[in-house]
Amino acid sequence: MKNANTVLKLEISQANKTIRPGKLALQAGSNPKGESFGFTNFYMTRNGEPFIPVVGEFHFSRFSYLHWEEELLKMKAGGVHLVATYVFWNYHEEEEGVFDWSGNRNLRHFIDLCAKHELPLILRIGPFCHGEVRNGGIPDWVFRYPLEVRSNDERYLTLSRRLYREISRQVQGTYYQEGGPVIAVQLENEYMHAGAPLDAWGYSGDKYVTAGTGGNEHLAELRRIAEEVGIRPLFFTATAWGGAAVPEEGTLPMLAGYAYTPWIPNQPPSREYLFQDLHVTPAEPVNYDSMEYPVAYCEMAGGMQVSYKARPYVPADSVEAMTLVKLASGSNLLGYYMYHGGSNAVGQKTFLNESGLPKITYDYQSPLGEFGRVGESYDRIRVISLFLHSFGRWLAPMGTLLPDGQEQIAPEDTERVRWCVRQKDGSGFVFLNNFQDHVELPDRRLRIELDTPQGKALFPHTGELTLRSGLGVILPFNLKLDGLFIASATAQLLTRLVAGNETVLVFYALDGMAPEIVLRKTSGSSVEASNGSGVVNEDDAHWIVRPTPGQQHQILVKTTEGRAVRLVTLTREEALQTYRFDGLWGQDTLVLSTSHPAMKDGQLICTSPGQNNVTLSLFPAPSPSSGLRSSTGELWESESGGGLFRSYTLEFPAYQPEMKLTSLSDRSVLLEIPADWPDDVVDVWLKVDYGGDVAAAYLGDRMLTDHIHYGQPWEIGLKQVRHELENHPLQLSITPLRQGTVHSFVNQAYVERFEGTEIAKIHDIQIIPHYSARLWPRIE
């Protein structure tokens, strides 16, 4: 059902955002190559240009070190600019005085890989981290001593100094100013705001590690100790939500946004999807002057960990919508927790998970999951990152302008349209959001009319547009790009590429929204749409281009400055398949693919889960005389239907592993899975559909992973344990979900009587091969 037509009007007459040095002006720095990072009070800079980075959290110690590199490459391909990671104290000093930096705990190896692939790194080093690990990361043995953690207790500070000294040894020589990737360090986490279950307590399950005492004085002491032992990054960061303590100098306050929260019973619709001016008025009270710092998020929900008592499912629409809303509301740094999930380490004496959470899995429903699973939100984030890559330097200085009434919208409101503008000098972007957690918003028919210092901007030029339920959009207005003046557009900008003497501007069409690009005639001398690529109309002042969506179509515009600009409008499906690789085969390249591509050592690595037939479209592509080669499978150039892109098909021999299943009971099976996979199969996954409460997978006597049922299939990647499959079957066990009544009483010991039915059944197991090939230009 659609709402009645709505006309949204806004006059843009306010002054530009005031940009000044701010509190972090002294935290600028450069590396030996002359590359630099810095800050104003409103945005970060890279090499002196405004910069809106995408930060992805990936806990190195929760993943096999043998596969860190390929996961970092997937993150980079997904549009991540900076990586963040925790250093969990109890992972490295589980036994007092004995530090372990080997294998999956090898911090230095992880740092070196980030350096190799030019991924700047933020280290979050505690001593308290939380991160849903046991005691928030503080080792059990610390609680044997009569000391107060998270305070200036001298005995606690002595232990903190020893930890920092050991971390400093691992990090030595890797800071950005030294040529390494480490640009920032977070000390502590959520200090003076939140603690964590004290699992070492041992008497009852309702005791918590303190939220901290001492405020900024303790953080100042931790920083003094860190710098004294050699931890000196460009800047420090602090988690600043919930009234947490934030140092006044040299520290970037960072925020969080979660809508599907196991810590709030009967979760009501959240305010995370409402537009605000976060620079002027933060979403909640904070202990710093927000006008002196950029709005930065280190923990926007990339998903959520399932707990035993609360089992939220986080849809990909919500991740995309929150990103759009925070960006519109003035956030100039977008950080996802988690971006990449993993598996908890197993301790020497116990599991290291937080109580009430899975023992092993920390999949988090994140864009990249526990075994490297690629989720739907991976594509959603990449689309926005592509936009920021090309247009973030224009967006970053633009202030947020809220139309009247936006600040009064309640999360439950399904009637009013949620929208706002970011602008500078009358140029900018309109943001629309039609998603709300725990509430379904209707389709909307609407029209937007902006009165700006550079003239009117209309969306669409005539008529109305349709905004589908669950979608959001970023629409440009009065934007001059490569000599071309875009008065308005009802298609979203995706990326910009310079190829030879031409510029290619790539848009994409939103589902249900007819694409239109309105160009001011004073900037263009001609507009040509051939071969069914669209319709071009005009009035006295504008060319009104209504492009045909699809990679095979293009509109050629000649600017009055004599430059050729090609407009390509992809479908949304194509946009979600688009990757950008700068420097691939000597040129910046767009790749549209049904596989998951990444770039390594001058090769394009294409991985396809379950599909042995892959399509790729490249622009620019290798010349026809050279073409492409593939390490495996059969590769041929396919009919592209014209346009800028050259298309290829990559086909692998179909492989279906023969899985032998032995049923031990309705709730337990043994799986014998072959380990002699073909060369073009790099992984084999299980997709398990079951009914029950929790599940666990075992290899021999070792728990490989577990799963708290939350309505989604259980996915298990086997690549990391392939060498064990020859000698050990994989056992899957289900713990029943009870439907009935439990009667319990204490008679010296706890006694429980259950009346009802128990559900524990494996319904289906799919085995899914992951095909992969390396591509490179053929050299004659």
Image (cartoon, rainbow, N blue to C red):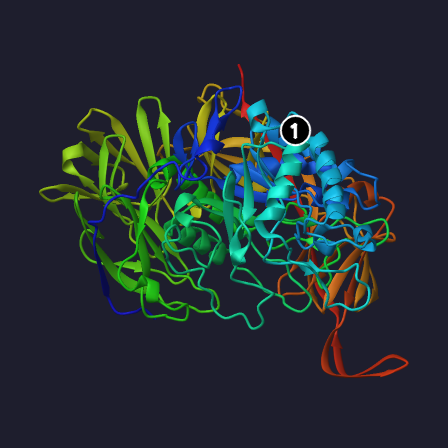
Which residue is depicted at the point 68% across and 53% down? 362
Q: Where 638 falls versus 325 (above or below)? A: above
> Which quadrant of the structure image shows residue 560?
top left
Q: Residue furthest left?
A: 540
Q: Which quadrant of the figure contains the N terminus?
A: bottom left
Residue 368 at least partly seen: no
Horizontal relation, residue 326 to residue 479: left or right? right
x and y percentages locating residue 329 in the rendered image: 38, 52
Q: Where 684 falls versus 602 (above or below)? A: below
x and y percentages locating residue 762 in the rendered image: 73, 65
Horizontal relation, residue 4 to residue 632: left or right? left
x and y percentages locating residue 52 in the rendered image: 43, 39
Which residue is depicted at the point 62% across and 62% down? 712
Q: Amino acid at mark 1?
A: Asp
Q: Where 710 falls versus 535 (above or below)? A: below
Residue 369 at least partly seen: yes
> Which quadrant of the structure image shows residue 436?
bottom left
Q: Which residue is mark 1?
A: 112
Horizontal relation, residue 255 to residue 526: left or right? right
- Secondary structure found at label 1: helix
Q: Residue furthest right?
A: 748
x and y percentages locating residue 378 in the rendered image: 53, 47
